[in-house]
Amino acid sequence: MIVTEFNPKHGRCSLIVESSEDLWTLRRLVAKGDTVVTRSSRVMKREEEFSRPDRGERVSITIALRVEEIHLDSSIERLRVRGTIVEASDDSVTKSGSHSVTLTAGHPVTIRKEMWSRVDTQLLRPSNKGSSRFVLVATDRRETGVGTLSGSHLAVLTTIESGLGGKMSHEQDAAPYLSKVVSFIAQIGNEGDSIVVAGPGNLKNTIANQLGRTTRLRAVTIEGFDLTGSDGIRSLVKDPAFQKLASGSVVVAMQKLVGEVVRRVSSGDRKVAYSLPRVKKAAEAGAVESCAVSDDVFASGVGEQELVDVLNSVEQRGGMVYLADSSLEFGKQVSSFGGIVALLRYQLRA
């Protein structure tokens, strides 16, 4: 999430959504009665003599809505906001009408609140959570997988095939393939990203060196990793060398949290809670040290607003909250526990 302006004194914050994790943060941040300002589109009916009454022109507008309803979709990829129009960039838009907007990654949004709470500020400024984005590359002579890891959300972007069989006996044969891989990484990479290249053989070193020569991006390589393509990207997140490199990041913190949950459940340690009713009880008692929510939590029949209230309660009492990617192993483990797990500071009474 890119926060371009935050002025709690005037009740205003402007930001750009970068990922589904940001949409989840936005869902927790925006409440009924707040005002959301963003770009949208609306059908304008023409009043010309020969125009059809059922046809209109769809125009882009900037619109401000006083929020009445806000919902995430089941996969947390879109956030739908519905409310009363209070401002619009087009004078033909009726101010007293209602409208809905669907927010996705890349959407710029301005939020207005009468009062910004401490939890609201924490959501916008999660200084204790690593926020570096990783660009992951798993490569060999035949194929290269490229993905990004932002927070705990992994996205496999592409698999590039070399089209060459057997060993590349001539370096010039590999040149178009290498150029394509480096160009794609340069296209999606940003300054500040941590680029990690892994895979068998020496091609990973060649890619890292060429990125350093031709771009402002700097890459590190991981030895002893033999998988490539999309499977390689998913496995690289679990590799001990990557976890050492990414120590302090959200994904490593998540893996440790879920691993400790499994250990406590297996050993009979009762300083753990799972499923929403149990975590809610622990949150109300101020016992939650940290908790993780799977991005497919709503498949477990969990109520959206109840979940938001529980997570905000956890952070109000000094606990940490993480969103787990259900496509990764630790995210699947969270899903198997009802979509939410928590480590407790102390054991609750039965």
Image (cartoon, helix red, strand yellow):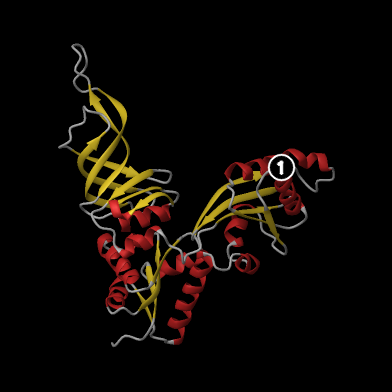
Q: Residue 211 placed where, x, y %? A: 70, 47
| Numbered label tally | 1
- The amino acid marked with disc number 1 is Thr
User: Nearest the camera: 339 or 92?
Assistant: 92
x, y (%) of residue 188? 57, 44
Horizontal and vertical percent for residue 72?
32, 53
Residue name at image x 63 percent, y 43 percent: 186
Front-lying residue, 142 or 64? 64
187 left or right, relative to 18: right
* Residue located beneath label 1 in the image: 214
Name the residue at 18% across, 20% down.
Answer: 53
Does the rendering let one see residue 319?
yes
Front residue of 69/92: it is: 92
Pick out the residue farthest to the right: 169
Q: Given the current orientation, which residue lies at the most extreme front position?
A: 9
Furthest-top residue in this view: 50
* Residue 11 appears anywhere in the view: no
Is 317 positioned to the left or the right of 180 in the image?
left
| Left or right: where 267 falls relative to 313 | right
Mark 1 residue crowding within 10 angstroms, few (<14) / some (14–19) / many (20+): few
Question: In the structure shown, which secondary structural element does the residue marked by tag 1 occupy?
Answer: helix
Is 334 drawn above or below residue 176 in the view shown?
below
Q: Quadrant of the C terminus?
A: bottom left
Quarter holding residue 284: bottom left
- Residue at coordinates 32% horizontally, 36% vertically from top-left? 40
**Is residue 280 rendered to the left or right of residue 185?**
left
Image x and y of residue 339, in percent = 37, 66
Q: Is residue 188 above or below residue 287?
A: above
